[in-house]
Image (spheres, rainbow, N blue to C red):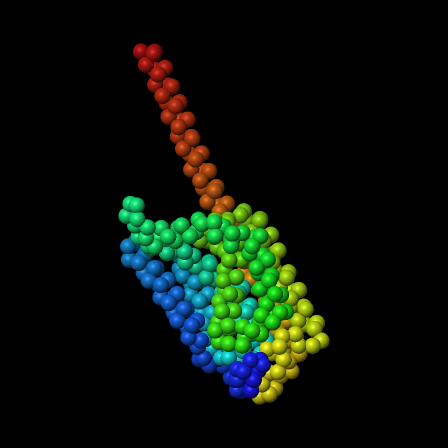
Amino acid sequence: MDHSGHGMTMDLPPFTLGRGLHWSADPFFLVACLVGLGLYGYGVFRLRRRGDAWSAGRTVSFVVGVLTIMLVMCTRLNDYGMVMFSVHMVQHMVISMLSPILILLGAPVTLALRVLPAAGKGRKGPRELLLALLHSRYMRIITHPAFTIPLFIASLYALYFTPIFDFLMGSKTGHIAMMVHFLAVGVVFFWPIIGVDPGPHRPGYLMRMLELFAGMPFHAFFGIALMMASTPMVETFKNPPASLGIDALSDQNAAGGIAWAFSEIPSVLVLLALLFQWYGSEQRQARRQDRAADRDGDKELEAYNAYLASLNARGR
């Protein structure tokens, strides 16, 4: 059955969670995820082998983040996401708002910088090229809130409420490109806010919270718009396969509810992580101040002892 008006056909059984999620991998995302896990694992192995520590929490966060991508792109969820708006919205929310946060907390760029060897004097290797990219004007632009927040918002409204979405959903390549876009937008939006990797734009913790809350309400508004619509708004999902036994408008309302509710999950997760990072930063600052005070005290004590020694010498 043609589900989008673009000639793509798909015959699916009725969707029920009780049936389980069968393996139905998208080759592009399967290979990308496996390569990402392999490179990260190799980096951790290299660090451990030379005696350097690497946080287990970071490793777990990165692995779970990649697994969430595989969950929505390498199971039957991906098949149903082609014909059901609600399932597609689950994919969108996970890959743009949950996966990026977990991957960023895994600090993959920091791991790469610690593992990659430095090139010889006057030469540029992978490590030097990565550092040049991190400090480039391009990175300063795409991680600035004046760019990330409008991009975050446009990825909802300019995509779903224009023919662009239907065009991308009309081919496998277009669908993959759209999902990669969602992931990239999530990474550049959350990187300055929560990322532990080095970057050109790193505001204070209070400003990071403001950036977070500047973007999240638009997800809620988008979800409410879908929930309140009286007709299907996206051509791709207007005629779901009869075998699914679903109503297009009801499915769209469910998609809106998912978009509205899901915006709370990353907000809470990011806020907790920011508060934890802020507390850790304050503790490190306090320790640095204590060490500085100790050094100053030692210098004062040395000066006082020297003064007493000079008095003693003059007395003799």
Percent from the top left, x then y, of residue 52? 32, 53
Q: Nearer the viewer, residue 235 or 29?
A: 235
Q: Is 66 above or below relative to 244?
A: above
Q: Is 152 above or below relative to 236?
A: above
Q: Is 60 above or below relative to 303?
A: below
> Residue, x 54% and y 75% (percent of image)?
169
> Residue, x 42% and y 37% (percent of image)?
291
> Residue, x 56% and y 54% (percent of image)?
147
Residue 271 in sight in this render: no
Quadrant occupied by the C terminus: top left
Percent from the top left, x then y, of residue 159? 59, 67
Percent from the top left, x then y, of residue 218? 63, 61
Residue 105 appears left or right of 302 = right
Quadrant occupied by the N terminus: bottom right
> Residue, x 48% and y 55% (percent of image)?
195
Badge count = 0
As drawn, the residue found furthest toward the bottom would be 243
Percent from the top left, x then y, of residue 210? 60, 52
Q: Nearer the viewer, residue 303 or 189?
A: 189
Residue 226 in sight in this render: yes
